[in-house]
Image: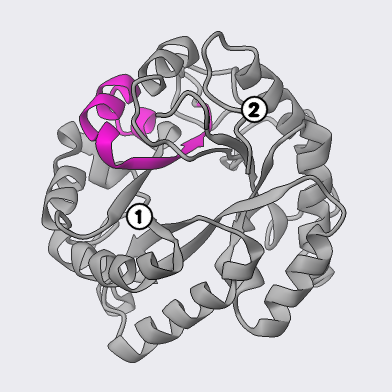
């Protein structure tokens, strides 16, 4: 990681928090511009460098991208990351449309497309919740996306979940190996790593050369998501030390996602602020880059 370009600290606008689950008055009926404005307000309140948002919110059409640009005007925030969920059985035509949407959003200035993979709908009942798909099928989709989007200055970063990270991250490692030779990178979610029973520091060292983006959420001793970062078992000083050795980390996004029985005592906006405050207070935490 270059000492002159530390990664940006982003607020991740999850659909869980901003669309279908009411929180702080947010509802899907607010409409995309309203949702973005709420996310912008949360990020500004928390002192973040920028946002991570859903590609479907800003790249569905040129009109959507234009509305997102208008929402961001006047704010000192970047939209460094977008995220998307993709079926490992996606047909070539649909993959082409996805690439088109991703390219339509390029004028927003984002650099990273974080990709969550799921098995084809007809196969999902065979697998546990959160299963990302077979490594060979995941790699096929990631390689094709990366090759098509790299000419547009976009890095495709795969986001593995707990099932791919369990057992020494065997499935994640196989997927990375199958993607070698293509510009596929990783989005490592530290909370998922902990819930998989793995050591974040160990995986950061093992996958460091391909890690470009990071998701940070904290986990309670019983495995539930914490209300904010810094309240759980995630060893942030140790993570900060490991991050200092990453060659090209570009963005670090704070994410709030609660379990049904998580005791929520503060607003989402306040938890966003507290989480950013905790991370910026960790000695050596590598955030605060310029966009």
Position of residue 59 in the picture relative to residue 3 (left or right): right
Position of residue 47 in the picture relative to residue 205 (left or right): right
Residue 200 quadrant: top left
Label annotation for residue 56: none
Farthest residue to the front: give it.
4
Name the spot of residue 103 as percent of width and height, x first: 51, 75
The foreground one among 278 and 131 is 278
The foreground one among 219 and 135 is 135
Pick the quarter of the image with the C terminus: top right
**Residue at (34% x, 74% y) in the render:** 148
Residue 60 quadrant: bottom right
Can you say whether 165 is above or below 134 in the image? above
Q: Which residues are magenta?
A: 193-218
Q: Is residue 203 magenta?
A: yes
The foreground one among 161 and 225 is 161
User: Where does label 2 land, which residue?
Assistant: 228
Is residue 197 visible to the viewer in this orientation of the structure?
no
Q: Is residue 192 magenta?
A: no
Determine the secondary structure under disc 1. Answer: loop
User: Where does label 1 land, which residue?
Assistant: 129
């Amino acid at each position: 990681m270059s000492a002159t370009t530390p990664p940006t600290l982003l607020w991740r606008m999850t659909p869980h928090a901003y669309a279908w689950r009411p929180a702080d008055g947010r509802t899907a009926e607010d409409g995309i511009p309203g949702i973005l404005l709420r996310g912008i307000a949360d990020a500004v309140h928390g002192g973040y460098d920028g946002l991570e948002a859903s590609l479907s919110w800003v790249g569905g059409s040129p009109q959507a991208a234009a509305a997102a640009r208008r929402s961001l005007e006047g704010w000192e925030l970047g939209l460094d990351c977008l995220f998307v969920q993709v079926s490992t059985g996606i047909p070539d035509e649909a993959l082409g449309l996805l690439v088109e949407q991703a390219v339509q959003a390029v004028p927003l200035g984002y650099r990273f497309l974080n990709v969550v993979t799921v098995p084809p709908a007809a196969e999902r009942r065979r697998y546990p919740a959160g299963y990302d798909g077979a490594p060979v099928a995941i790699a096929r989709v990631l390689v094709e996306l990366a090759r098509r989007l790299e000419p547009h200055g976009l890095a495709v970063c795969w986001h593995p979940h707990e099932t791919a990270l369990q057992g020494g991250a065997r499935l994640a490692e196989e997927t990375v190996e199958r993607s070698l030779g293509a510009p596929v990178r990783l989005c490592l979610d530290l909370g998922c790593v902990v819930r998989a029973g793995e050591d974040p520091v160990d995986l950061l060292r093992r996958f460091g050369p391909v890690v470009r983006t990071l998701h940070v959420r904290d986990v309670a001793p019983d495995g539930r998501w914490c209300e904010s970062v810094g309240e759980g078992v995630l060893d942030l000083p140790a993570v900060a030390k490991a991050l200092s050795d990453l060659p090209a980390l570009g963005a670090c996004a704070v994410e709030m996602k609660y379990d049904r029985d998580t005791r929520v005592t503060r607003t989402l906006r306040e938890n966003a602020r507290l989480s950013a405050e905790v991370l910026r207070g960790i000695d050596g935490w590598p955030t605060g880059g310029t966009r």
